[in-house]
Amino acid sequence: MMNSSVSYGHMYGAPWFYGFGGGVDFLLNLVAIILIIALVILKGYALWHAAKRDQKWWFVALLLINTAGILEAIYIIFFVKEWHKKKIKC
């Protein structure tokens, strides 16, 4: 016996798209999409630097280990120190 008060709208399309009618669901979906895009950019930037520096072990680790951007941020902050080498000329 099915409970008629339960919404089964996700059965007709992707669950992440279901909440785009407005309200809290829309905001949560928007935040999730922005977070996913930011994490993909961060991972790509870290992988690009590891490949450019010929650091094969870092490249493999960054590619296979998913830590929600934590490992990528550690690699960029502590191992890619290009911004420290650049001096501002006045």
Image (cartoon, helix red, strand yellow):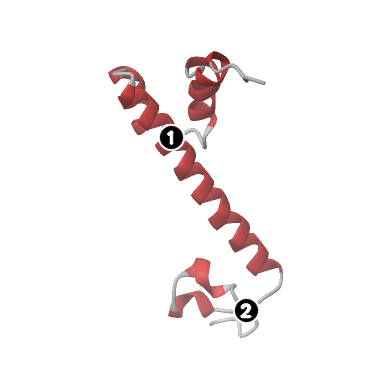
- Give residue 4's position: percent from left, percent from top: 61, 85
- Nearer to the camera, 2 or 35: 35
Reading the image, the residue beneath label 1 is 45
33 left or right of 55 in image:
right
Q: Earlier in the sequence, mark 1 or mark 2?
A: 2
Q: Nearer the viewer, mark 1 or mark 2?
A: 1
Residue at left offset 49%, top offset 26%: 71
Residue 62 appearing in the image: no
Q: Amino acid at mark 1?
A: Tyr
Residue in the picture at 59% in, 74% down: 20
State the image coordinates of residue 75 (x, y, percent, origin top left). Answer: 48, 22
The kind of residue on which mark 2 rests is: Gly
Residue 22 visible in rendering: yes
Q: Is residue 28 above or below residue 60?
A: below
Q: Residue at x 48, y 29 (%)?
A: 72
- Tell which of 10 and 46 is nearer to you: 46
Against 78, residue 64 (above or below) is below
Q: Kindly identify which numbered label has been placed on residue 21.
A: 2
Query: Left of 25 or right of it: where is 41?
Result: left
**Crowdedness of circle 1 by 10 Å Cα count: few (<14), some, many (20+)?**
some
Q: CA distance from mark 1 to mark 2?
A: 34 Å
Q: Please, what secondary structure does the residue beneath circle 2 have?
A: loop
Quadrant of the image containing the C terminus: top right
Q: Secondary structure at mark 1?
A: helix
Q: Position of residue 27 (x, y in %)?
A: 67, 64
Above or below — where is 43 with respect to 87? Answer: below
